[in-house]
Each structure stands twice: as structure tokens, then as C-alpha cells.
Image (cartoon, rainbow, N blue to C red):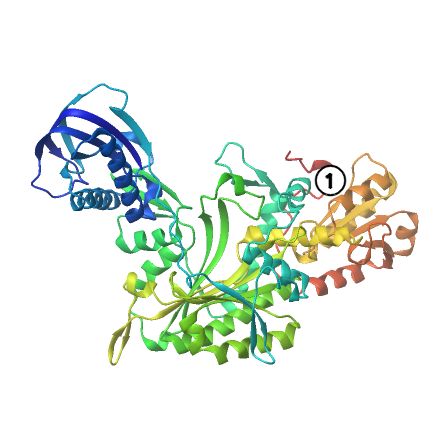
Amino acid sequence: MKMLLIHSDYLEFEAKQKTKIAEETENLKGKLDECLACFIAVEREDENKPEGVAIRAVEEIEKVANQLKVSNIVVYPYAHLSSDLSSPETAIKVLKDIENILKEKGYNVLRAPFGWYKAFKISCKGHPLSELSRKIVAKEEKKEKGEESKFYLLNPETEEIIELNEENINIIKDEELLALAKHELGIKEHRENEEPPHVKFIKEKDICSYEEASDPGHFRWYPKGKLMRDLLADYVYNLVVNMGAMPVETPIMYDLGNKAIREHADKFGERQYRFRQGNRELMLRFAACFGQFMMKKDMYLLPRYLPLKLYELSTYSFRYEQRGELVGLKRLRCFTMPDMHTVCLNLEQAMEEFEKQFWECLKTGDDLNLSYSVIFRFTKDFFDEHRDWFFKIAKEYKNKYGKDVILEILPKRKHYWVGKVDIAVIDSLGRPIENPTVQIDVESAKRFDIKVHTNEGEIYPIILHCSPTGSIERVLCGLLEKAAIEAENGKAPMLPVWLSPIQVRVIPVAEKHYDYALKVAEKLRENNIRADFDDRDDSVSKKIRNAGKEWIPYVVVIGDEEMESGKLTVTIREKSTLKKPYKEKMTLDELIERIKKETANYPYRPLSLPIKCSLQPKFH
């Protein structure tokens, strides 16, 4: 909130013309003598805590009024103080709250109407305290004792839960789970401020880079990076369709004049792109919830349809992260979110689906060869009622993966969910990258008027939110950070073969080998293998080094021996170390068969770059 305070001989106003956002009122004119005139602009950041900002504004007004020894206050809406205004509804509420609180304190208050063009006259007294400006921010609410979340380590076998704190945190022996626990408890590590290696990799590997002509935290994606994103999108698409989801597409922009959308958006906090178009306040989505909920609201849902899953690759989603927190693909303002919402008849069906979707989320870690760490979050009421169900899941997880989980217990519900699971990859600096999630939403169906028609009447269903991988960008972030850890351990870093933009590079030893090498590369492409042919005027050793820098999984060098014998010399990156490449002899057909087997059941897209390296452009 911005506020201009003027100690005045008088302020007089008269409302002349009504705008589309004007409040209904009969108070269209007024005058107050010997007053403190408070010109107020309610801002977007006040949306989250309108009551708190009204209280802070009154405290400031009262402090100045006491200094000036005045008891007459004019509350005057004045949008010109800010270019980042709140919604009209919030502004009116805050202004009315300020008026009422001041009246309760014994002040004589005149409030000018909101949303009207007004003529006004004011006479400023002209002394050192007669003109003051203030920036008002709501106070942080102090948590009362017992309101804080508590974190626990589980022993699924004994069903014992051990409360975690800074003193006993090292009872967690799994290094990755320990890193996640430290993050949740706010325990800072000495490497916190280092730049993660993937920030360097995304540019080095021609994946993507920041777009300087855009807002910070937005990226340009080069052909290799675009290919990788598309392959990951295809992977998730196949996964959710096999789970029974129906893909849909919805807008990226929503009208905050819609009450349900505003309430849902306000729960997310201030990290939003909001803007005005004429008299409408709009926002860019931060997930696919809005569009899918509006779609479900218009559906005639019957119990036999449930559980009903809608899926969207939310391209794009927007979150206005703080500029200082933007870190490569881990924290950015524009991202691609696979987002599935499941309508469930009741809590029992929702818990069954939650369990299934949890295992599907873990499967993505297996498929991507990423190591996941798991934290469950429940309200105390939900956990107490469903403790046995939760321990059954934790025990099955321990048996399959040999890992423990962390549990967060919230004393009461403060979000739309009563339970969720968050799954993270730990980066090379020991910090979590949040990836898959499943959430049990008990609130949104009623807010958006989503109903299921049963024989007993209409009921509000339970809705699950699920992102099976987390954002596509964070998946890439996790894979690149994993590669950095491999490099630290002396292993040759690489991406999964099915996701590598170039899967095979063919290198001729001399010009006389060019035609044969080119035919090898062409045959690989004919068999849906992304191959290229290094025809550049470099030495063979430099070409091999370049292929290594690009993390190409298979490098084929062709000289006289290979042409005569028909056996290729293939460097296999997965079996190589940074100091020693691993080579095998195999025929072209054997190489094709090997890659086909390695990439079976994963999506394929052709390489869009020219087959000859000399024709492949550089993007930075």
C-alpha cells in the first residue's frame, strides 16, 4: 500500500461520474475541516493479507494523527500513487476496514467513494509534518505455540516416528534424505550460495540460455534443448494416457473477476504475474488448475466416470519468483508443467488413487535413472485418522527402494490439501530440486462448483493434483546435476541415450573415409537413431574431444580397418571414465540393435540439425 498523508485546513470532495468498478454508495459528497487527509492506493501485494495491511495503515495514521493532535480523518482512494494496484474488491475491503477500525478507535472519519471520478479541494497547512508519504506492508503473523509444522523420520517396521531437529538430524544416514531434511528444517549448508553446475551445462551443451530481452527467469531454447523438452513431454504424455488420463488444453490467462479463480490464486501468494487490461485484472496461470477446474465445472459428472483424469502439459506456467532466487532451470519464472487432476467420488477413492499415482511418480525416477527422496505432508487430523494406511505405503516403499521417508505434520489445514507427497532430486550441492507431487484437494470442488450427480443428490468430489515428473525444466535440471555428480566421481557424465540430442557421432579418419562414414550416419538415421557426421577440418583427436564435450553416448571412428573389416570402433560413454574411454568393436547392425534395445519403450523424435557437423550453426 502507498499512502500520502496531508494535514489540512479542510478537504472537500464531490463524486461526478461512476466508473465500471465503482462501489455502490450514497456518500457522493463531503467535507471535513481540520483533518488528516489520507490518500491511499491499495496494491497487488496487499491481496494476500488485506486485514493485516489495513491494521498497519491504521497504526501509521494514528501515529501521525497523535503527533498532529487531530481527530478528523479523511480516507481517500487515490490510484495514482501506484502502478501495481490490487483488485477493486480488495481495495474496497481494505478502505472500509481502515474506516471502521478508525471509527472504533474514536476518530471522526469521512471516506470518499471508490471508483468514482471526483472533484476535490484541499488546503494543506504547510508545516514540516503536513505532507508525509508512507509505504505500508502487512506485519508477518506470529505463529502461536503449537501452530508450527513438525518433521519426523519414520521407521516403517516399528511404526515409530522420531521428531527431527537440528541436534538429532544426523540420525538420517541416507545423504540425500539428510539433505532434504536439512532444507525442510532451514539448516543452511556452506555451499548454499554456489552456482549449481547445470547453469554452466545448459549453455555449454547448446540447450538453452536466459533471454535478455525478456523478463528475468525466461529462457530461449535452442534446437537440442527443444528436442529434449519435447521428448520429455512425449514421455509424460504416454505415461498419463496409460494411467487413463485424457489430455486437454486450456488458456494461460484468467480473469480475476471470477470469484473462484481469485480465491484459488490468492491462496498461492504473491508469486504471480498479474496485470490490467482496461478495467479487468488478469493473471497468467501458475499451473493448469484454473482451466481444468472450469472445464470440470461444466461437465455432467456421474459416479461411473470416476476417477476421472484430465491432463495438460501446461506450456507455459508462470511464477513471479524473486529475482535473487532465480537459478537456472531450478528456479525460473516461466516453465512447462505436466499437470493432471483426478476427480474422485470420495476420500476413500481419492486415497486409492493417491497411492497409485505415488507409485507412478516413483516410476519416473526409475525410467529417468534419477534418485528420489520423499517427504509426505499431512494435517494432524488426516494423519491420525489414516495412520495405518500411511505406514503401509511407507513400508512398501522401504521394501522396494530401501529408503526411509520424512513426514511433516501440520497442526491444522492451511492449504487446499489435507495430504500430499513431494518427491525431490538432490543436486550436486546438496540442495533439493522439487520434482513429482500428488496432493489431496478437499476444497477446490466446492469453490469451483464441481459436482458429481448421484442417486442421492449432488456431491462435491475430492480432487487429486499430480505432476508425475514435476516441471520439464526441473527434470532436465536434475539430469544435468546427476551428470555433474558423476563427473565429480570420475565417471564420464551423460544423459540417458533416448534423451541425448545426438546419440551417435560418426568420425572419419581421413577424407577417403568420408563417403563410407556418411553412409553409416545415414543408415543410423534411417533406423530412427539421431546421428551426425563430423566433416569439419579438425584433427581426429579434436573431433573425439568435441564429441566428449557434447556427452554423445556413442562415438564411431572410421578408418581403413573399419572399412575393410566392416567392424566399427565404438566408444561407449556409459562404460567410460573421464580418464579412460571404453571401446568395443561391433558391426553397424549390432550398434543399431544395441541402441534400439537401450531406447525401447521411450519416445523418439528425429534430430532437426543437419547431418554434417560443418553445417550445424552455433547459437551463442
**Residue at 86% across, 41% down:** 541
Secondary structure under tag 1 reads helix
Circle 1 residue: 613
**484 with respect to 29 (left or right):** right
Whether residue 222 is visible, yes or no, is: yes
* Closest to the observer, 337 or 134: 134
In the rendering, at what x and y percent does residue 430 appear?
A: 65, 53
Q: Residue at x 78, y 59 (%)?
A: 591
Q: Vertically, is 518 above or below 469?
A: above
Quarter occupied by the C terminus: top right
Task: Using the image, determine if residue 172 lies above or below residue 79.
Answer: below
In x, y percent, where is residue 17? Answer: 12, 32
Residue 76 as seen in the image, left or right of residue 47: left
Res 599 → quadrant: bottom right
Residue depicted at x 80% and y 62%: 590
* Amino acid beneath label 1: Cys
Q: Quadrant of residue 569?
A: bottom right
Residue 601 visible in image: no
Residue 205 image offset from top left, x and y in percent: 68, 43
Label 1 Cα crowd, 10 Å radius (few <14 / some 14-19 / many 20+) = some
Depth check, front residue: 225 or 280: 280
| Count of numbered circles in the view | 1
Residue 218 lies, with reference to residue 267, above or below; the image says above
User: In what quadrant of the picture does the N terminus appear?
Assistant: top left
Residue that appears at 76% across and 63% down: 594
Where residue 326 appears, as percent x and y from the top left, is 54, 42
